Amino acid sequence: MSKLALVNDDQVGAFVQQLRLWRIQRRPGQSLYHEGDPAEFVYRVDKGWVRLLLDGEDGLRRIFAFVGPGDYFGANLQVRDCTAEACTDLQLTVIPVAGLLRIGRTDPVALLELFEACTKHYRERVEVGRGQPSAAEKLRAFIARMGERITSGGRSGICLPFSQVDLANYLGVAPETLCRAVVQLCERGELARHGRRLWIGGCPPPPENRKASQGTWGLRRRPCLVTQESSNADQAIGG
Amino acid sequence: MSKLALVNDDQVGAFVQQLRLWRIQRRPGQSLYHEGDPAEFVYRVDKGWVRLLLDGEDGLRRIFAFVGPGDYFGANLQVRDCTAEACTDLQLTVIPVAGLLRIGRTDPVALLELFEACTKHYRERVEVGRGQPSAAEKLRAFIARMGERITSGGRSGICLPFSQVDLANYLGVAPETLCRAVVQLCERGELARHGRRLWIGGCPPPPENRKASQGTWGLRRRPCLVTQESSNADQAIGG
DNA sequence: CGTATGTTTGAACTGGCTCAAGATGAGTGG
DNA sequence: CCACTCATCTTGAGCCAGTTCAAACATACG
């Protein structure tokens, strides 16, 4: 995972467990917070994927990070410096910043490591787009990074839980350009497809129950807004 | 200064003053540390400019941040995640990380703010290159950001202490392309030039003693390597 | 089964890259 | 102080990847 300082997950996890935590769920497209909001919580992704993005002055939004299972995000001291949205069905652990600061005296290093883990996504973004690679190479690099990131499950084939539009946005190319790059990599066998999903590593889902593998993602027209407060009460953990 | 969380400089400064600090100097082109080095110090820029960069696998290096007077940089817990080099003649305050962690218990928030100040450069990088603006617009955006950053001095005209090559590297365009963009903005009066230096805001240096305004920068063939250790002893402050 | 959204494909255009050669000026050495 | 040298900047011309526009297609979802 690049040359960034690695986080001692156990230590951070134990540190965080001192606080009263809880879980929330989100559906694809729902937002966790917006740029400019007051920052009250840090999050840990338990299941699903989150995208971090900035709203450009020209009305265009720019995705700069995808945050996956095991990752922390949302460490801001004052206000949110970006927007966070669910890419997929999402399960998060919520960690109150106020509590973190309170127990920070007991273990400042763990606190720093937690914040470091959150800024990892900004640092990795810096590494993206070195040189002026072609669109295909950008995609290839992305696949490589994602591959080594989610190979932990042991399963060979893995589904990228992002739409091509999001991917194009993240890589900084037009959707059409990305599409052509996808076709190209598929022909070379570096990428596979089933329906609209991209698969890396191994073959697409097993021939039988492929119906089951198609989770929700698009969410046409039912935002199904779950307020943070309402879901907070659902599952209190830790503390 | 964008929508990023602002750092309480006074508080961080007071926090840091508890430690034994010292100053070092560097000449243009000299490096502070390299990607992969063990991280032992955080720095504060007193005078001059620093560039942060990554060495690409293809041998190309990519500048992703310019760090100026008043800015902190170099907050890594384990190893350096990038390389830092002097753009100009440089004066820095050195802050030992070990000491920071030691006194972190007394004021974890100040510690966090210091680290936040250091990661600011990574965050700002994320904002660069939103959309697919033309080279001229990238340059214009850079000028605007630099302008609001160094207008603190009160002087109207300000010299950009970077070579066009560095600027092109930072903006992710070819030097030739940047050069054409510079010409374009100069014609529009959004930018001025004296010799090889770019000026923003006001007119170039006063007609009289312009000889004085030309500080060293290029440094042809005399690296004049000052080891960190040797210069450490020079000016101990704080503590 | 119908529909909206996301994906695919084609074709023309264009901005930036590349290569190459010339001009400038910062720094060196006499 | 001046002439020299070489890195940096400048300019031109051609090329190509990626963008844009537009229209057909497919797939999730209701």
Image (cartoon, coloured by chain):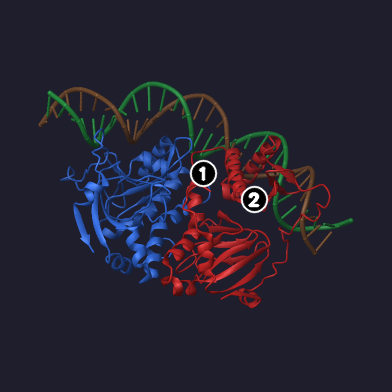
Chain colours: A red, B blue, C green, D brown
The answer to whether residue A159 is above or below residue A12 is above
Confirm whether residue B31 shows in the render: yes
Q: In which quarter of the image is residue B176?
A: top left
Q: Where is residue A12 in the image (x, y as percent from the top left)?
A: 51, 64
Q: Measuring 67% from the left and 36% from the top, which residue is drawn there?
A: A184
Please name the residue that numbered disc 2 is placed on: A165
Measured as percent of width and height from the top left, residue B28 is found at: 28, 42
Q: Is residue A8 above or below residue B166?
A: below
Query: Mark 1 belongs to which amino acid?
Result: Gly
What chain is tagged by disc 1?
Answer: A
- Report if residue B6 is visible in the image: no
**B122 left or right of A165 in image:** left
Report in which chain the residue with disc 2 lies: A
Camera-nearest residue between A72 and B51: A72
Residue at 66%, 76% in the rendered image: A234
**Residue at the disc numbered 1:** A129
